[in-house]
Amino acid sequence: MEQRISLITLGVADTTRAAAFYDALGWARVETQDGVIAYDLIGQTLGLYQRAKLAEDIGLPEEALGHGAMTLGYNGRSRAEVDAVYEAALASGAKGLKAPMEVFWGGYHAYFADPEGHVWEVAHNPFSPLSEAGEFRWNGHG
């Protein structure tokens, strides 16, 4: 198995509401089918799929999916970008969980939850600069 993630699928109760949030952030939908709403990212795709249908596809009862202890991360090029993304998310219907602030290791970050409760971290890591195309690597593209 190659070391990569191709598709991140978020199980959602209300695909219309979930898609409206990501649309409001300025993300562009791609052609979708079978009830999946997709957004192409840099080298990956984020999919929104009805939680009940996702559970059925896996073969589990919906309540078995629960909410995992994980975050989706967006790294920005600057502290100002962290502030701007956090404010745009709140204006688009996100719930603020942690306002932008400095982190003990020298970075800057914030947390918010999308309307379905999926937790996002938006951060600037000065030790891991993004590539020109916006790709993230743990130790940067320097």
Image (tube, helix red, strand yellow):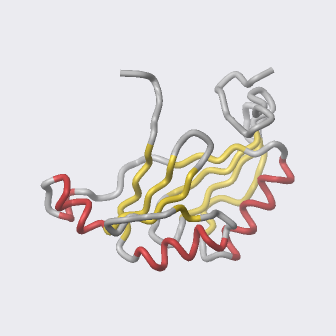
Q: Which is more toward the observer, 140 or 7?
A: 7
At 71% from the left edge and 45% from the top edge, which residue is drawn? 123
Picture quarter containing residue 94? bottom right
Is 51 displayed left or right of 97 in the figure? left
Picture quarter containing residue 141? top right
At 62% from the left edge and 56% from the top edge, which residue is drawn? 111
- Report x, y in % for residue 97: 60, 62
- Report x, y in % for residue 11: 35, 62
Q: Which is more toward the observer, 89 or 29?
A: 29
Q: Which is more toward the observer, 11 or 36?
A: 36
Is 33 displayed left or right of 28 in the figure? left
Relative vertical location of residue 137 with respect to residue 67 in this rendering, above or below = above
At 45% from the left edge and 36% from the top edge, which residue is drawn? 5
- Report x, y in % for residue 24: 65, 73
Total of numbered circles in the picture?
0
At 24% from the left edge and 66% from the top edge, which residue is drawn? 53
Is 10 displayed left or right of 22 in the figure? left
Is 140 displayed left or right of 39 in the figure? right
